[in-house]
Image: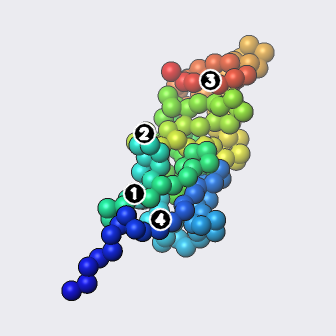
Amino acid sequence: MTVPPDPSTWKLPRLRITRDGTWLHEGEEVTHPGILATLWESLRVDAAGHYMEIGPVRVPVEVEDAPFVVVRVEADEGRLTLTLSDLTREPLSPASLRFEADGVPHCRVKGDRFRARLSRAATYQLLQHVEYEAGGKSAVLVVGDRRYPLGDLAGETTLE
């Protein structure tokens, strides 16, 4: 009978998600669709950071910015629908939208568990639903017949 190896002796893989949502394993891009699907489905987050569980072992995942990237924003029946880097689709939660200090919008996705960074294309698509007021500093996100104030776009803003 063979005794399984002690998990504490395992060499953990080095996993990283880049700013643009690319998965890297030991510095090499992961491109296989099946492996990518497994990585996305296995991703978890807690107070200690992003990780995957492989049996009894916690494998850390380094995340450059946000683990998910919004690659598309579409108006859909009175709401904005996001397409994420894992190719899933979900409605935008306007209350979770934040503009970081560098002006890049982020929002919460996957049942509010993860942050997502909007790609340049998705940001442009989102801004098609923004109306500007007060000399271009104050803005409102218009979704169907609802209006969500974005506040002063010069710094970090939130939709509360």
Q: Is residue 27 visible?
A: yes
Pick the front one: 92 or 155: 155
Q: Residues within 10 Å of mark 1 (few under 14, many from 20)?
A: few
Asked if labels 3 and 1 touch by Cβ distance under 8 angstroms, the answer is no
Q: Which mark is residue 12?
A: 4
User: Considering only vertical position in the picture, is 24 above or below 97?
Assistant: below
Q: Amino acid at mark 2?
A: Ala
Circle 4 SS class: loop
SS under mark 3: strand
Q: CA distance from mark 1 to mark 3?
A: 35 Å
Q: CA distance from mark 1 to mark 2?
A: 14 Å
Of badges 2 and 4, nearer the viewer stands: 4
Residue 77: x percent and y percent? 49, 40
**In the image, farthest residue toward the bottom:** 1
Residue 47 numbered mark, or none: 2
Closer mark to the observer between disc 2 and disc 3? 2
Q: Residue furthest right?
A: 135
Relative to 36, 139 lies left or right: right
Q: Which mark is residue 157?
A: 3
- Mark 3 belongs to which amino acid? Thr
> Residue drawn 45% across and 53% down?
51
Please state, as top left, top right, bottom left or bottom right, where the N terminus lies in the image: bottom left
Question: Counting other residues with Cα less than 10 Å from the Cα at mark 2, is it few (<14), some (14-19), or many (20 or more)?
Answer: few
The kind of residue on which mark 1 rests is Arg
- The secondary structure type at the circle numbered 1 is strand
Residue identifier under label 1: 58
Earlier-in-chain disc, 1 versus 3: 1
